[in-house]
Amino acid sequence: MSRRVAARAHSMLEAMSASFAIAVDIGGTKVEAALVDENGAVLAGSRHRAPTGPERSAEELAASVRSALGGVLALIGPDTAVSPERIAGVGIGAAGPVNLVDSRVSPLNMPVWDDYPLSALVADTVHPVVPGVPVTLRLDGLCITLAEHWVGAASGHDNVMGMIVSTGVGGGLILGGRTVPGPTGNAGHIGHVEIGGHEDACPCGGSGCLEAVASGPRTVAWANAEGWVGGTGEELAAAVAAGDPIALRAVARSGRAIGRAIASAASLVDLDIVAIGGGFSHVSPLLFEHARAAVAERATFGYVTRVQVVPSALSGEGPLIGAAALIHRAEMVD
């Protein structure tokens, strides 16, 4: 047997014996579920999604979760490639706020799920197929931070903030090599840090919150108010690339707000690196340039300006990998 054939056979045997986490990511536009192995790789063909959103009822949202999970659970069984014994647990990353004491969620972008028993819903769906496996819930921002620390842009750093800039703005913290969820599970939720100089109303009840200023929908809305005609982050990205002055100002405004929030967080907890993902983070490289420039304004504080602000290295799989890390890297999870 040649070395190449032997290596391929060894890789196949490893895949056949790998353990998997069922990863679930629940956000303001969709829920996704997949099988993720102990190396942070999403199993090909296991990724399933269903729509969410503020226009759906509580039961419609629950049906979407069951639908996404159903696609994954169909791959698990005694006569399939993934036996129930190979499932190590279920990790859930959810938009916040979360309530870890009771395993419930109250996502701002889905208000009908106020204090909703999400872990129970997932457990009731999964346990008939994989009896008794643990179900772990954490804020989606914490999950993306775990993913970046594990196999992404923050690998090798132990003082990390991960951020999601998308329909909302979320975040999470790893300090000293361990997650910092806080007593309720909401530590690191940087989207609701207030940014000086802004009065934009936020669904949380505050004003000038980072999410109210710099999320994709809020940035588009600000550009519309200034006279730009367009309806999506993708259209805004195209306008930025074409040099539209209003679109450029909109991205600059959001980027500066992100940078100010990062500088505040670095001042408080002394970070090495901030990794930013989420759909709107791809609007333009200028978003990162403006964020870094805002951090650099804290010139007197070298421990703040040293923080690296980088894009996520995990593309669209990051939230699922982070949810799986709740199981595969449980030793880091407080």
Image (spheres, helix red, strand yellow):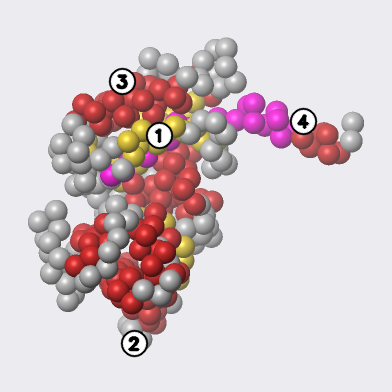
Considering the numbered disc 2 on the image, is that residue within a helix, a strand or a loop?
Answer: loop
Residue type, mark 2 in image: Thr
Asked whether 311 or 54 is in front, the reply is 54
Q: Quadrant of residue 226?
A: bottom left
> Can residue 161 be seen at all in this image of the molecule?
no
Could you tell which of marks 4 and 2 lies nearer the N-terminus? 4
Q: Which mark is residue 300?
A: 2
Considering the numbered disc 3 on the image, is that residue within a helix, a strand or a loop?
Answer: helix
User: Which residue is at 90% across, 31% downward?
Assistant: 1
Give the answer, above or below, for where 319 lies relative to 234. above
Residue type, mark 1 in image: Arg
Work out how far the residue at label 1 is from the one at label 2, CA to CA, in angstroms. Answer: 47 Å
Asked whether 268 or 59 is in front, the reply is 59
Could you tell which of marks 1 and 2 lies nearer the N-terminus? 1
The residue tagged 4 is: 9
Residue type, mark 4 in image: Ala
* Range of residues picked out in magenta: 9-28
Q: Which mark is residue 49?
A: 1
Work out how far the residue at label 2 is from the one at label 3, CA to CA, in angstroms. Answer: 53 Å
Q: Quadrant of residue 12?
A: top right
Across and down, in percent, residue 267 comes to: 30, 73
The residue tagged 3 is: 124
Work out how far the residue at label 3 is from the one at label 1, CA to CA, in angstroms. Answer: 19 Å
Across and down, in percent, residue 231 comes to: 29, 57
**Do callouts 4 and 2 mark residues in contact (Cβ within 8 Å)?**
no
